[in-house]
Every structure is written in structure tokens, then in C-alpha cells.
Amino acid sequence: MSHAAPRALHQTFLPNGDAGRAFVWKYSHAIGGRRPRHFHIEPEINLVVRGSATFGIGERVVSVSQGELVTFPAGQDHELLAASDDLYLYAIGLDPTYSAEVLGREHGANLPRHVGIAQRELAAIVDRAAAIVDKSGADSLAAELWERTHGVRGAPRAPSTTHVLTRRVMQLLPNAPELSLESLARHVRAHPSEVSRHFHQDMGVPLSRYRTRLRLLRFIRLVDTADHDLMASASMAGFGSYSQAHRSFQSELRCAPRQFFREGLREKMQALYY
């Protein structure tokens, strides 16, 4: 089942301050406060410990129930569409550098996953998450779950329905989002239309749009952390020009870069809940 995905906001996952390289948030139907559809540079794990949830992930709709986790790669738009009255889940995000470190070169691609956790293991994971929710100290738990979903260092590999071409593309894109479809197709030795078709089916978003998001996220990170001006950051993020970055900002986030960085629009996006 799929639907046309609405536009998404940019909302970071990790809180400001010394939160470490991973963080755990909690959500329940009783607490409320859902985020609108959004994307961010941090890969994310959602683990349902009670009840059930329905997520919109790009154009796809995925149902997750107790003892299951679903992952969102960096730049993947997602939204909690529906929740059972007893829903309780933990959302765990990783700094992208930490994610790459955990997975290593062989498993470096962030991929969409939907994985079940055995009941005997779930209780122990929930206890650990409950002890560190909303505070620092989530690095170890995040790494363990991330390794589990990707079959790293002896962890059982979760079955993946992601096409091999998508997996190969997702190993290339995070470090080189400026690569064109034709360049990606040459790297993975397939026809561009085949690469594009499988990527759209697996990720629920067109490859061209996903590439744009990754470049926007790199652009934002460069401005925030490297003390570059907007034009230099746009070039370093893989945009051909600042005007191209400006158009991408307008198309994806419906604002200009200067509005986002200097006029408080980012903070307004970050604060949106419903």
C-alpha cells in the first residue's frame, strides 16, 4: 500500500547540548505530541514495546506492533500516522558519524528495516531504554540495535527486502550525494532506469529527491559546524551553485536558506507538534 507523500519538515533528532552520540525519546498515545512528517540527518530506530503503530515512510505505509522495530535512514521522511490507544515506543537516533562507525565499511549503508525482537530479549532492551530515556547514555543500546538490524559483528542479520541495487546506491550516496543517476548507475553496473525504479520502490521516495535531501542536510551541517558562509557551504555540499541550493531549499523546505538560518524559521519547524 502506498500514498503520495506530503512535504516534510527538517527536524533534528539529537537534542542540543552534550547528549552523546545517540539519544532515546519515548512516545505514548496517552502523552501525545506527535511530530509532523519530517526528516533529519540522524538515522533513527523506532521500537514498539506496547500496542501498535502505523508509519508513513515516504510513499509507503508500514504497520509495526509490539516487539518490532523499524528504521529510518538519514534523509528518509517519516511520520506516525496512527496509534493504538495503548501504544508505547522508544525512538532512538544516532549521530551519522557514529552510525558509520558502528556499521563499518562493509555494512556502512543505512537501510530501511522492519525487524522483530524475541520476547525474551525485548524485556531486557526495554529496561535499558527506560533507564536512559531523555538523557545521555544511549550510545551502547543504539549501537547494539543498529548492529542487530544490519548483521554486524556476529549479530543475526535481519532479512532484507531491499533490492541489491538500492543497497549499493545507499552505500555510495551518504558520502557522495552529488553523484548523478548516471554516475550511480555506472558504479553499480546497471541501467539508470533500473536503479531509479528499484530505489523508488524500496525507499518510497524518488532517487532525485533523496539525493537533494542529502545535499541539503550536508549543507545545513556545514553551515552549522564548519563556519562556512552559505555560498561556500552550498558548493561543498555538492550543489553546482548557490542558486541551485536556493532552489532546492525552496522546493523541499519551502523557504530560502537565509530564512532558515537567520530568521528563526528552523526553530519554528523544530517546535512543531500536533
Image (tube, helix red, strand yellow):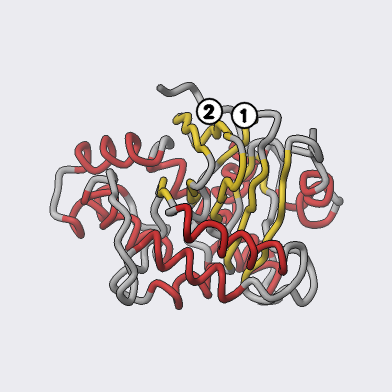
Q: Are marks 1 and 2 in contact (CB under 8 Å)?
A: no
Give the x, y percent position of residue 153.
33, 77
Quadrant assignment for the C terminus = top right
Give the x, y percent position of residue 250.
64, 39
Residue beneath the point at 19% across and 56% down: 188
- Of residue 222 and residue 154, the one placed in the foreground of this image is 154
Residue beneath the point at 22% across and 50% down: 165
Q: Can you see residue 35?
A: yes
Q: Is residue 35 above or below residue 180?
A: above
- Report which quarter residue 50 is drawn in: top right
Give the x, y percent position of residue 18.
76, 77
Quadrant assignment for the N terminus = top left
Q: Can you see residue 240?
A: no
- Residue matched to label 2: 5
Q: CA distance from mark 1 to mark 2?
A: 12 Å
Left or right, 84 with respect to 197, comes to right
Left or right, 207 with respect to 167, comes to right
In this view, the mark in front (1 or 2): 1
Q: Residue furthest front?
A: 120
Give the x, y percent position of residue 113.
40, 49
Find numbered disc 2 in the image and state the secondary structure of the residue it sits on: loop
Residue beneath the point at 61% across and 66% down: 233
- Of residue 81 and residue 165, the one placed in the foreground of this image is 81
Q: Is disc 1 surrounded by few (<14), some (14 to 19) or many (20+) residues within 10 Å?
A: some
- Residue matched to label 1: 81
Find numbered disc 1 in the image and state the secondary structure of the residue it sits on: strand
Q: Is residue 139 above or below residue 8?
A: below
Q: Earlier in the sequence, mark 1 or mark 2?
A: 2
Tag 1: amino acid:
Leu
- Report which quarter residue 48 is drawn in: top right
